């Protein structure tokens, strides 16, 4: 297949083995509708917004010198603290007080910014201490204790020294509380996952079980997957079940502010409203389960293709066919898929490996979308392109956009050509034209990939007629 500045698709078994680009959703839990968008010129002129309650979460796309000001009033005046991220040709970051050298804090941060993709950060101020960190990490990479504190009511953003910037700023009303042991709350679907470390438990964390103390619902990255597990505060880790053993993780995320309730389940019968909480190294959605075992109620992962709930316990990964699963809300058992569906062609009951048995393709895709907070907008190819639509290439100076459409039992990614007023999808050796489709409106970036390069933060954008995840590539 030959593609020139267009879009192809990537499956987990590529037919052609050569390096290519795959679309990676670096902010998979990101909802553009909830963020303030700013564009800053190469002028070192701050644009101010109201400050949150002790924290500001933001993303920036710039080659260097992303500057953030913390002030009492929406103006450049003392007292004032400035955070320079990626200064000195994107080699270090500093904190400067009252626009005066020497800087009060400094750290080497080579290549911390990128002109081609958004990078997420947080800045907190609590008890006179200013801390700066990367999105998704509970640890700060830059900090300063201010001996002369002042009220911080405004936050300013600017770029300079040869750089322009695009900013995505979380509104002040939605910023994470400064009392939380984390920088940023990461929301996935209706759930809120908060980064933490070393036994920290954020406010409103969801209790999932007990073992002499409360056990919280957590998840962590491991071997190319995002694996649900149990957070035990006194142990200082989140334990996840993987590879037959109980794996401790010092850095993890905790489920917070979520009102679900465990319900009985068994085997591969996953309730339609089960909360996607992670994914395996192969891209299969994983769910939150728990089991009563040896006087404990232990949280673990439900893997549909295996038909069991795995729990981390006593150093081992134990499996149970009977378990409880955590849904969006309490549901009756009769809503579970226990009989032959009406649209049998859209189910994987006859797949050889039964990898996604009893889960419809559309339901499966919705779970992936919820897990990564993907925004796919129904679109008629003759209509106007949404302002937040994702570009993926060009043909004869016409911009192309990421789309997907149903075809022969699959939901296949492709590209929308506004000039032709169609969405093209590759399937069966041909390019198929679709007038009705969905258009992607979630930011991301194309990154190099190959057959052996598994991208943890890529997310399925479609599903084949055999139930195999499909990804966006070019």
Image (spheres, rainbow, N blue to C red):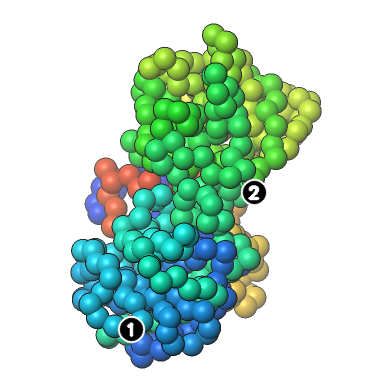
Pick the front one: 204 or 20: 204
Q: Is residue 416 above or below residue 230?
A: below
Residue at 50% in and 63% down: 55
Label placed on residue 339: none
Residue at 21% in and 63% down: 108
Q: Which residue is mark 2?
A: 190
Pick the front one: 102 or 201: 102
Looking at the image, residue 388 sits to the left or right of residue 393; the answer is right
Q: Which residue is mark 1?
A: 99
Q: Nearer the viewer, mark 1 or mark 2?
A: 1
Assign a secondary structure to mark 2: loop
Looking at the image, residue 22 sits to the left or right of residue 434; the answer is left
Other residues around mark 2 within 10 Å, as few (<14) / some (14–19) / many (≥20): few
Pick the front one: 118 or 51: 51
Looking at the image, residue 355 sits to the left or right of residue 236; the answer is right
Provide residue 291's location: percent of width, then percent of height.
58, 18
Provide residue 68's location: percent of width, then percent of height.
40, 75
Provide residue 43's location: percent of width, then percent of height.
36, 91
Q: How many marks?
A: 2
Q: Is residue 35 above or below residue 275?
A: below
Residue at 51% in and 79% down: 72
Identify the image quadrant of the C terminus: bottom left
Assign a secondary structure to mark 1: loop
Q: Is residue 29 above or below residue 108?
A: above
């Amino acid at each position: 297949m030959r593609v020139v500045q267009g879009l192809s698709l990537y499956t987990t078994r590529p037919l052609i083995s050569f390096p290519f680009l795959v679309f990676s959703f670096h902010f998979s839990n990101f909802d553009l509708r909830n963020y303030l968008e700013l564009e800053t010129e190469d002028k070192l002129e701050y644009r101010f917004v109201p400050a949150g309650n002790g924290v500001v979460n933001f993303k920036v796309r710039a080659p260097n010198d992303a500057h953030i000001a913390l002030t009492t009033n929406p103006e450049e005046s003392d007292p004032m603290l400035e955070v320079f991220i990626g200064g000195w040709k994107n080699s270090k970051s500093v904190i400067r007080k009252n626009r005066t050298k020497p800087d009060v804090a400094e750290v080497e941060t080579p290549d911390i910014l990128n002109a081609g993709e958004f990078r997420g950060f947080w800045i907190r101020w609590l008890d006179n201490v200013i801390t700066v960190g990367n999105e998704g990490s509970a640890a700060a990479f830059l900090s300063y204790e201010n001996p002369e504190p002042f009220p911080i009511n405004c936050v300013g953003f600017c770029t300079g020294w040869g750089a322009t910037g695009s900013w995505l700023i979380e509104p002040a009303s939605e910023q994470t509380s400064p009392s939380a042991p984390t920088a940023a709350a990461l929301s996935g679907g209706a759930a809120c996952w908060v980064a933490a470390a070393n036994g920290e438990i954020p406010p409103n964390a969801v209790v999932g079980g007990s073992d002499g103390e409360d056990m919280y619902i957590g998840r962590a990255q491991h071997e190319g997957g995002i694996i649900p597990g149990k957070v035990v505060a006194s142990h200082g880790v989140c334990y996840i079940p993987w590879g037959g053993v109980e794996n401790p993780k010092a850095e993890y995320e905790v489920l917070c502010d979520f009102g679900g309730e465990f319900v009985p389940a068994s085997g591969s019968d996953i309730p339609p409203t089960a909360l996607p909480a992670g994914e395996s190294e192969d891209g299969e959605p994983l769910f939150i389960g728990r089991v009563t075992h040896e006087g404990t109620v232990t949280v673990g992962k439900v893997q549909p293709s295996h038909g069991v709930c795995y729990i981390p316990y006593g150093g081992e990964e134990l499996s149970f066919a009977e378990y409880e699963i955590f849904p969006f809300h309490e549901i009756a058992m009769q809503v579970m898929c226990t009989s032959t569906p009406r649209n049998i062609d859209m189910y994987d009951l006859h797949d050889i490996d039964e990898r996604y048995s009893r889960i419809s393709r559309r339901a499966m895709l919705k779970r992936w979308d919820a897990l990564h907070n993907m925004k796919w907008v129904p679109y008629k190819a003759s209509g106007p392109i949404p302002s937040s639509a994702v570009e993926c290439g060009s043909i004869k100076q016409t911009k192309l956009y990421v789309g997907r459409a149903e075809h022969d039992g699959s939901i296949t990614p492709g590209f929308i050509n506004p000039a032709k007023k169609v969405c093209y999808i590759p399937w069966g050796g041909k390019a198929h034209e679709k007038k009705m489709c969905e258009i992607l409106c979630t930011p991301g970036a194309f990154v190099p990939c190959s057959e052996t390069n598994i991208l943890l933060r890529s997310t399925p954008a479609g599903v084949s007629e055999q139930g195999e995840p499909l990804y966006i590539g070019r």
